[in-house]
Image (spheres, rainbow, N blue to C red):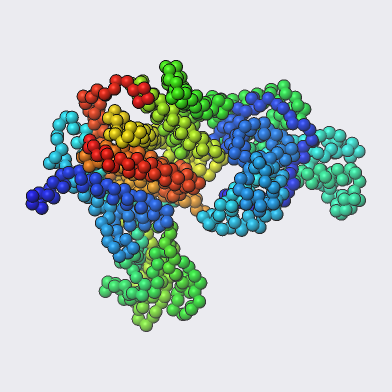
């Protein structure tokens, strides 16, 4: 038997499945337990999303996506080349198709989906989504227009940034941390500007919830004969600013932004709590969508999202501020979102048909008609 | 909030108990009428009977005589503070607090609050530390402190209407005349307090704080003023007993109602107090009935039928009754092992049916009381799983009349009942839903499917255990075909419900959070069950696994189920809000150990003999 034939046979048989499922289960258990120690975000990236898992940082192992891919290929081959496409087998075929759809949906979601959030105070209008996890370092002009963007995780301490030639300055990174600890600065010089006069940043261990990490940068901007050292902290609204050749440049560290093709305005936010407790019973945001000349109102509440132009907005949470409650809407773009629905329906039908067909199969008579204690 | 409560308690503990009720014997009153009075507690309007049970269970781990205890706590706090109701199990806590060990492990508020007062520095240092770093003893000490604060809060709930120990003499000047020579309460002195303060100010200006120099009348005024100040001080933090509804939909405690525009309902409570101290049962009963009618007819949020339903649910606990019925049925089955006759089978099957009806009534009552599907806590999922398992055993018994199904149904029901009781030791089992869970459709479809999946997993595992044991008992023969088929059917049903439930959960997550799958521990647990079943079933279909291996796999499903149902809650992470717990680690570990030993024990000796493929 040729290797191709052997491979073909292997791909058509459930043997592959029987070996891959225990590995997937092992990843599932390990990744779940790991969440207690390293948090969901890290555990997902290491055990569930990464195609290669590094054991101890040195031994590479195929990751869960590889095994899910193998299951997908195995199932496809089985369906196409081996499964008897009969009425009696229809339940199993439908169930297998639904699993393929589910895996395909997972692939689409992994490749093409994006999620973020919009935090809106009452009356506030935005057309930008902030990412939950990714941070970016941005150089802006005086009007706040973005001139250049760099991923924060690509910025390393003690390195210089490669900037476009349009910028009449250079930037050297002194410190870059995903989660920063602020400590008082002791070696203050005339070059330290703004927050940098009083504080310096040190790398702190990452928090379990990536959203709680406070990213930061300490960087030096050199232009003409001037050296200025700044501290930039995530989402601090006052940006380090320089003026060179009559132009003003601002530097910001923030959650990665994605622009929406329309704007969203929060008209009202309402929350209900269970009386006598702090427990939220329900919350809802009344929003106004503006898309070109069109505009209309909609209500987003728990389990009742708003869908528009491929985006889905969910009532995620709210933040209490001195100015009032800020509604946090999760915004998701997912081209594969219909897969689970189709798959779920197919799976349900498939399993019911299979159970029905199994119930109708001819019964063998038991050897003993009666069994006192079974 | 807990930190605030603890800090608050530090201040409050330095005050003596507010109401010094006049000493008298225990008052025996009819509690049936007051038991249904509505109270807002933890976001839910419930009958006073439930409130009393929850409170007493939190303090002492028991709930018998809860309402009588609550009435005494409310109306006679001086006596109630000497009742031993606070449970301390950990001997190290007793050592820290210099308390002697007791058989019943119960201590009174007075005993504990006195020693806790001396440990405030230690308590504050624990509160200041990260909760994750607390030792078991530190955690228990903080829980005890919280319980003492809660009990203190409760003890002070009605002190504004209780009789004071001070009586003003008749010889006082005119403004005090209407208040002399009779028992007063805080509310009765409200109009007097201005004059009292002014008079006392004059006395202090003249005689300073030398109480010995005061006349008996002045001493009485000073004593009254001091008592009123103490009552007000402690009463301000007494907010747990929210029994007075307001016009705007809120609920107030009696002390909070003092500052409200309309506090007419206090009059009813005053009447109850008068009846209590006068041991006037008729007045007590009539007043409680009037109060119930007044509150239920004037408050839109109150559902009197739900209050009644909950009262009867407490009075005749359906799951406890079902448990007793199961025990009776199991006894009948056990006796049939020695001398079998049809009567025993009839008794056992009737017991299984009776248990099912009780469980069904219990769940129906819970739906009616909560006005939503009853599956939002671990406890509720256990109840539902038990119902499904009992129903399946009943149907199967009716179909083929094998006593196996009676053993299985009754045994599993008894086990799940005990498991349920162990998950309902503290607090209210009727909890309010957080915003994201507040959807009847998804709760009904997703959670019920998953819970049904759990029930079938348990059935599959027990059937597999039995089949393996029987096979071993018969000298290692191949597993019984009929039993194997029954196990496989249960496994397929488990796979069906677990898969559909998991997919529905994903769709719910997509509706709520915008993502189908988030690798949350609870989601992963459900997926683990599905994968395990797929693995075993495909192993069987593809003939990669022997019947024996398949049965071992199905037996071990109990471990996968335990990890998925309870184990993931030990991690304390994830979005699924229900039931984080850290106390079950050892029980879970022991269970996994026993199951592992079982599978090894039934596998090793059979390896030589049984290799029959499906």
| Quadrant the C terminus of chain B occupies | top left
Residue A113 locus on image (x, y percent): 28, 51
The reply to whether residue A50 is in sight is yes
Q: Is residue A179 left or right of residue B285?
A: left
The extreme bottom residue here reads: A225
Q: Nearer the viewer, residue B92 or B466?
A: B466
Q: Is residue A119 left or right of residue B222?
A: left
Q: Is residue B235 above or below residue A359?
A: below
Q: Is residue A126 above or below residue B468?
A: below
- The tally of labels here is 0
The reply to whether residue B506 is in sight is no
Residue A123 locus on image (x, y percent): 43, 49
Residue drawn at point x = 51 percent, y = 41 percent: A273
Q: Nearer the viewer, residue B355 or B18?
A: B355
Q: Is residue A244 above or below residue B294?
A: below
Q: Nearer the viewer, residue B41 or B500?
A: B500
Residue A99 locus on image (x, y percent): 24, 41
Residue drawn at point x = 44 percent, y = 17 percent: B343
Q: Is residue B273 left or right of residue A294?
A: right
Q: Nearer the viewer, residue B279 or A374?
A: A374
Residue drawn at point x = 74 percent, y = 29 percent: B27
The extreme left residue here reads: A2
Residue drawn at point x = 29 percent, y = 56 percent: A50
Residue B105 locus on image (x, y percent): 65, 42
Q: Is residue A334 above or below residue B413?
A: below
């Amino acid at each position: 038997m040729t290797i191709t034939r052997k491979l073909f046979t292997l791909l058509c048989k459930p043997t592959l499945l029987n070996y891959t499922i225990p590995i997937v289960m092992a990843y599932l258990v390990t990744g779940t337990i790991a969440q207690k120690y390293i948090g969901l975000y890290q555990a997902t990236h290491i055990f569930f999303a990464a195609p290669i898992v590094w054991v101890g940082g040195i031994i590479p192992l195929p990751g869960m996506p590889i095994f899910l891919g193998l299951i997908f290929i195995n199932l496809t081959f089985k369906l196409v080349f081996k499964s008897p496409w009969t009425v009696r087998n229809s339940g199993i075929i439908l169930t297998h198709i639904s699993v393929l759809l589910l895996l395909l949906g997972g692939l689409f979601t992994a490749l093409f989906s994006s999620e973020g959030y919009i935090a809106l105070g009452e009356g506030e209008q935005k057309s930008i989504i902030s990412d939950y996890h990714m941070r970016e370092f941005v150089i802006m002009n005086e009007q706040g227009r973005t001139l250049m963007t760099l991923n924060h995780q690509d910025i390393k301490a003690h390195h210089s940034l490669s900037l476009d030639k349009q910028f009449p300055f250079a930037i050297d990174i002194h410190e870059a941390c995903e989660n920063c600890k602020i400590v008082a600065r002791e070696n203050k010089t005339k070059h330290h500007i703004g927050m940098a006069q009083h504080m310096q940043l040190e790398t702190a261990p990452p928090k379990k919830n990536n959203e709680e990490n406070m990213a930061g940068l300490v960087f030096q901007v050199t232009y003409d004969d001037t050296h200025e050292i700044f501290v930039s902290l995530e989402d601090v609204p006052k940006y380090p600013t320089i003026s060179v050749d009559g132009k003003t440049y601002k530097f910001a560290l923030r959650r990665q932004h994605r622009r929406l093709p329309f704007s969203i305005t929060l008209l009202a936010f309402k929350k209900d709590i269970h009386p006598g407790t702090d427990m939220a019973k329900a919350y809802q945001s009344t929003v106004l969508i503006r898309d070109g000349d069109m505009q209309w109102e909609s209500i987003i509440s728990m389990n009742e999202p708003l869908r528009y132009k491929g985006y889905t907005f969910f009532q995620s949470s709210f933040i209490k501020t001195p100015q009032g409650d800020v509604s946090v809407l999760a915004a998701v773009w997912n081209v594969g979102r219909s897969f689970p629905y189709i798959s779920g329906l197919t799976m349900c039908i498939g399993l019911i048909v299979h159970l029905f067909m199994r119930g109708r199969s001819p019964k063998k008579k038991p050897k003993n008609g009666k069994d006192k204690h079974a | 909030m807990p930190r605030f409560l603890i800090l608050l308690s530090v201040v409050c503990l330095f005050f003596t108990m507010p109401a010094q009720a006049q000493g008298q014997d225990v008052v025996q009153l009819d509690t049936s009428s007051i038991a249904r009075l509505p109270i807002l507690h933890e976001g839910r309007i419930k009958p006073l009977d439930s409130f009393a049970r929850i409170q007493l269970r939190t303090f002492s781990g028991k709930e018998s005589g809860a309402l009588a205890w609550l009435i005494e706590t409310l109306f006679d706090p001086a006596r109630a503070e000497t009742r031993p109701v606070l449970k301390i199990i950990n001997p190290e806590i007793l050592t820290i607090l210099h308390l002697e060990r007791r058989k019943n492990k119960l201590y009174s508020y007075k005993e504990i609050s006195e020693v806790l007062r001396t440990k405030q520095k230690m308590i504050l240092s624990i509160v200041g530390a990260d909760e994750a770093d607390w030792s078991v003893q530190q955690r228990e000490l903080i829980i005890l402190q919280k319980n003492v604060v809660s009990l203190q809060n409760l003890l002070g709930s009605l002190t504004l209407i209780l009789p004071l120990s001070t009586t003003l003499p008749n010889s006082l000047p005119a403004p005090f005349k209407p208040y002399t020579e009779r028992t007063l309460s805080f509310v009765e002195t409200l109009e007097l307090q201005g004059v009292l303060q002014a008079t006392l100010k004059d006395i202090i200006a003249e005689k300073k704080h030398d109480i010995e120099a005061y006349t008996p009348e002045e001493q009485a005024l000073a004593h009254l003023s001091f008592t009123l100040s103490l009552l007000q001080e402690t009463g301000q933090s007494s907010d747990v007993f929210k029994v007075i509804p307001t016009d705007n939909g809120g609920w107030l405690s009696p002390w909070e109602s003092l500052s409200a525009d309309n506090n007419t309902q206090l009059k009813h409570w005053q009447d109850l107090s008068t009846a209590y101290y006068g041991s006037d049962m008729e007045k007590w009963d009539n007043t409680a009935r009037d109060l119930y009618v007044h509150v239920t007819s004037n408050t839109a949020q109150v559902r009197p039928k739900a209050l009644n339903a909950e009262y009867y649910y407490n009075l005749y606990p359906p799951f406890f009754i079902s448990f007793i019925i199961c025990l009776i049925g199991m006894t009948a089955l056990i006796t049939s092992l020695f001398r079998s006759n049809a009567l025993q089978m009839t008794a056992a099957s009737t017991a299984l049916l009776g248990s099912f009806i009780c469980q069904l009534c219990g769940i129906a009552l819970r739906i009616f009381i909560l006005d939503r599907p009853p599956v939002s806590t671990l406890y509720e999922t256990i109840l539902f799983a038990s119902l499904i398992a009992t129903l399946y055993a009943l149907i199967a018994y009716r179909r083929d009349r094998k006593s196996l199904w009676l053993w299985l149904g009754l045994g599993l029901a008894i086990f799940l009942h005990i498991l349920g009781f162990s998950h309902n030791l503290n607090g209210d089992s009727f909890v309010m839903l957080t915003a994201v869970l507040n959807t009847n459709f998804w709760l009904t479809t997703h959670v019920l499917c998953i819970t049904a999946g759990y029930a079938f997993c348990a059935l599959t595992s027990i059937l597999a255990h039995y089949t393996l044991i029987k096979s071993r008992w018969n000298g290692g023969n191949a597993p019984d075909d009929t039993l194997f088929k029954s196990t496989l059917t249960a496994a397929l049903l488990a796979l069906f419900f677990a898969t559909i439930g998991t997919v529905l959960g994903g769709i719910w997550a997509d509706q709520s959070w915008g993502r189908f799958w988030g690798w949350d521990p609870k989601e992963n647990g459900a997926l683990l069950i599905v994968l395990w079943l797929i693995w075993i079933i495909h192993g069987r279909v593809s003939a990669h696994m022997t019947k024996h291996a398949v049965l071992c796999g199905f037996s071990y499903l109990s471990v996968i189920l335990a990890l998925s149902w309870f184990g993931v809650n030990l991690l304390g992470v994830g979005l699924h809000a229900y039931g984080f717990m850290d106390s079950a680690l050892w029980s879970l570990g022991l269970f996994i150990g026993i199951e592992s030993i079982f599978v090894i024990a039934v596998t090793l000796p059979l390896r030589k003999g049984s290799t029959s493929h499906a």
